[in-house]
Image (spheres, helix red, strand yellow):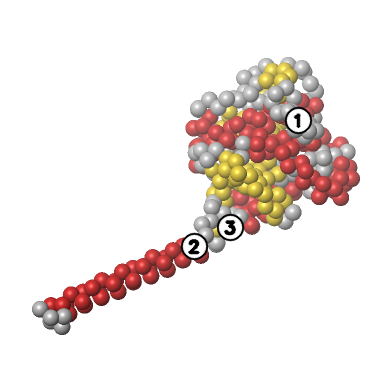
Amino acid sequence: MGAGTPTHRGEAVTVIRRVVLCLALLAGCVAGGAAQASAPRCNSRILILSAMPVELGPLLAQTAGRTTVTYDGHDFYLGRLRGRDVALALTGIGPVNATRVTRSALAHFRCGSRSGLSAVVFSGVAGGDAIGNVVVPTAWTLDAGRHVVPADRRMVANARRVARTNVALERQAPAGDPACGCVISPDQVSTVAVTTTPRVEVGGTGQTTDPVSGKALPCVPGGGDVLGCTPCLMQEQAQRDAPALVSGAAAFVDPAFFAGYSSPVEESSKYVVEDEETAAVAVQAVARHVPFLGIRAVSDGAGDPLGLPGFPVQFFYYRQLAADNAARFTMALLSRL
């Protein structure tokens, strides 16, 4: 047959239709790829807060791929911890500082109209029943029980499950790195062992107090693992906070600070732990419908073989032990959140 026969014309039309269809599909793929590229994925993170460098240090040391972002003058350390995307930050000591940093995180970590934080966890030390114990209250109060903020029920349930896995908690107190010299690991030099066996306790109400009456205590550049402005791993950044040195140091001369901060919980107390930050963080998280859990390990309480006179002496001696235990439980919990 000739080139102009109906059969060849029909075949030509079919080929043209197929080419047009392929071009349309290709255009759709390109457009779809462009749309996907123009809408970057928003990673939801777990916010982990601590008040002092000694508390955040064990967690930051295990965080992979660390980068730093700064919002409202506060550093947030981003990375991966136990398989989870996290943002870690120091709040500083006291409920005023804790409130400010939590508000900043909730405001800046966003995925469009929704929060970019899937949960908020506080990991730190506190006064409690026995040194080294990890306490996970199911509720917190900022005003001596007049108002109570519940911890997230699912997170509490996960904490109970993790507690049953027998998380390895330390009993031997490490010397720590009080000056943030970071020459050796804080865990390499041991001191005494507490007389009780540390355990995880889930339940009860934790209390946050404010012994400095609404003051925002500034950190102290070069203030070590308690009063310092940054985790020991990041001490080179402390110089930018130099103007706060004098006022920051003066704040801790106030006897009210040492009389009230992290005082041990007596046997008759209705609160399972007492600290200066957790309830303030809980109020901010719950108000914005972000799940919250507070994890506190006891730095001053029973079980001291040296018979030290409570806070602040016990705190300074056992702070690293408590911080390590809180961090160990926090990391064990992450895989379930």
Q: What residue sits right under mark 3 in the picture?
A: 110
Residue 121 lies, in percent from the top left, at 60, 42
Q: What residue sits right under mark 2 in the picture?
A: 37
Residue 4 sits in which quadrant? bottom left
Instruction: Determine crowd level at label 3: few under 14, some 14-19, many 20+ residues with C-alpha closer than 10 A.
Output: some
Q: Earlier in the sequence, mark 2 or mark 3?
A: 2
Residue 64 or 126: which is nearer the viewer? Answer: 64
Say left or right for 87 vs 233: left
Q: Nearer the viewer, mark 3 or mark 1?
A: 1
Q: What residue sits right under mark 1 in the picture?
A: 183
Residue at the left extreme, as displayed: 1
Instruction: Determine crowd level at label 2: few under 14, some 14-19, many 20+ residues with C-alpha closer than 10 A.
Output: few
Residue 97 lies, in percent from the top left, at 74, 48
Residue at 63% over, 45% down: 66
Amino acid at circle 1: Val
Residue at the bottom extreme, as displayed: 4
Q: Is residue 128 visible?
A: no
Residue 264 lies, in percent from the top left, at 73, 29
Distance between mark 3 and mark 1 Cα atoms: 38 Å
Is 290 placed above or below 202 here? below
Residue 172 sits in which quadrant? top right
Residue at 70% over, 53% down: 70
Say left or right for 9 vs 204: left
Residue at 64% over, 57% down: 107
Task: Assign a secondary structure to mark 1.
Answer: loop
Amino acid at circle 2: Ala
Residue 245 lies, in percent from the top left, at 86, 45
